[in-house]
Image (cartoon, rainbow, N blue to C red):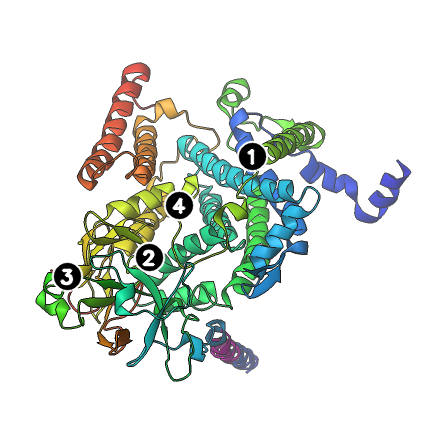
Amino acid sequence: MSVYRWLDERLDLDRLNKKFMRKAFPVHHSFFLGEIALFSFIVLVLTGIFLTLNFEPSSRLVEYRGEKLPAAYASVLYIDSLPFGKVIRSAHHWAANIMVASVFLHLLRILLTGAYKRPREINWILGLLLLGLTVVLAFIGYALPFDAYAVTATQIGYGIAKSIPYLGDWLAQLMFGGEFPSLRSLPRLYALHVLWLPLLLAALIGLHLLIMIKQKHTQPRYAEEVAPGKVLGVPMVPMQATMMGILFLLYLGSLFLLAGALIAHPVEVYGPPGTSTPVLKPEWYFLWLYGLLQMIPSSWQIPLPGGAAITSEFIGGVLIPGLLGLVALLLPFLDTRRTKMRYLELPSQHPMRTSVTVGLLFFFFVATFAGWKEEFGMTNAQLWAMLVFIPLGAWLATYVLIRQIWGKEG
Amino acid sequence: MADKTVTNRRAVLQASLGAGLGLAALSSLFVVGGLKPKKEITPESEPPKEGDRFVIAEGPDKGKLITLDALPLGGPFVLAWPKDPNTGVVKSGERNNLAMIIRFQPDEYDEETRENTDQGVAVYSAICTHLGCTVSQWLADQKAFLCPCHKGIYDPRRGARVIGGPPPRPLPMLPVKVENGEVVAAGGFLSPVGVAWRRSGAPRV
């Protein structure tokens, strides 16, 4: 206690306590998705520190156990040989997967409950940027082990960047340190992956949280019934903090159990990069793009002035995800209804928004399914029919079902 | 009088702030210019040119000079790096130099393609025009190149035009001649290699 008093005299802890530590946190299970994303980031930083201490960001060939291997690849083999090295690297991989998933689910929660609306536009946009950064960081993380899988996947990313009309060559070289793969690529990708983008991510997370504290959560429905117009919740310290602590430990335990049981991405299975292309599929969160890229035929080409063209790879790799992102960014400015600004909206009472979201999810599902085009022996015509009609059908069916069960928009 | 001084002071402050910002912005262009790495060309990364030979790029015979009798008639193709015969340098320092060498009967090619072949030998870039993977598979039944990344298929007997999948352009061709049984480049690649947002001539249909 005397330590507390000593610090309080100097730092006015009581004021901090009243202002921040007693912040009321509404309790709702779906509110933990953002926290899981935050835990993932923390674990990624901690496991990442271990990895940076042993990783060598270079594609120069070195002698390792009697073989000529890229230095990065050899250093990953070395990391795997350290005590728990494999498990820590595997945890880094799985935490990245969980982070992408939880950020996306967090976004869905916000979308379905209308929490993106005025006055929370800024945090919605910050959230989208955080999703984008998370995916970019995960993608760059692909490249670092520099095995055959890493090099092929990164080549495709380089190709997508390069396909942007007029700016392509310049942007791709800026991001990948010249043409990929070159000796300058790994140092640049490494710096982006371990320093600059995580710093940016941390700064944006801080801003995201500060704005959330300032604007307060949208209140769950029960709050509207129990104490209308009041902020209802448990104080951040000690109750919310205890719940967070328990959840974090559960997260940590489950993550390392998973990481130890399923060792992720063993580089020696893919081998060092060679001249031939290994047959591979990207991570699940890129499968929808992979599916789209296979579906868009070579004939989809729009000539532009100056000898440029919008090509099939630009449409699949940049245009479609870019348009989806743009619509998402504009959403709070399109949906300007000023109802329920303090409270969560029930998905059942917003049949149009909910059904469009379900339709969009089915678009992702079908595009992901198209990633198995070969295995299922599907033709492009079949896949295109599915991609158009299944999401439309899901949209209509959801809309009709919600209206039938819960009645009119309210 | 006093008001005027304040106005003048403000104007001076604004002008100097503007000039400072402008200069800072201008000087940042140097930084942006330095972010794009320079392309350093070494003998190993020079593009293929007339007179270059070819060596096998992978497998047990890696590095062996490619001759007519090393190429099976009707496929599959052989992945190859160009090699400068004067210096003996294998140009494997630049991925875009990777080539596929294939051999058919001369009359199996269409006329336009045949011009750039010799004794049935044709050389194509191995870098997919879709997203830059190595086109490394051979479809024996269709006698076609397959890029395993997004299943682009190219027909080597008709200028590597796209016969399946998403690639936007045919694979660039490299004209060849056969001298003393050796496959020799008669020039560089005829169109830009790999991914490009530029239209490289009209795709052949």
The one nearer the camera, A155 or B105, is: B105
On residue A280, the disc is 4
| Alpha-carbon span between mark 1 and mark 2 | 31 Å
Prevalent SS, magenta region: helix
Locate residue A32, reporting x and y percent: 56, 31
Locate residue B12, reporting x and y percent: 53, 81
Question: Within 10 angstroms of label 2, few (less than 14), some, or many (20 or more) residues?
Answer: many
Q: Is residue B57 above or below residue B5?
A: above
Q: Secondary structure at mark 1?
A: loop
| Alpha-carbon span between mark 4 and mark 2 | 14 Å
The quarter holding residue A66 reads bottom right
Q: Going 39% across and 66% down the picture, which residue do you hit?
A: B95
Locate residue B1, reporting x and y percent: 55, 83
User: Are discs 1 and 3 located on one and the same chain?
Assistant: no
Please give the residue where the numbered disc 3 appears in the rendered image: B158
Q: Going 28% across and 46% down the picture, which residue do you hit?
A: A294
Q: Is residue A113 above or below residue A180?
A: above
Q: Secondary structure at mark 2?
A: loop
Tag 4, which chain?
A
Query: Residue B54, can we see it?
Result: yes
Q: Amino acid at mark 3?
A: Arg
Give the extent of the magenta segment.
B18-31
| Alpha-carbon span between mark 3 and mark 4 | 28 Å
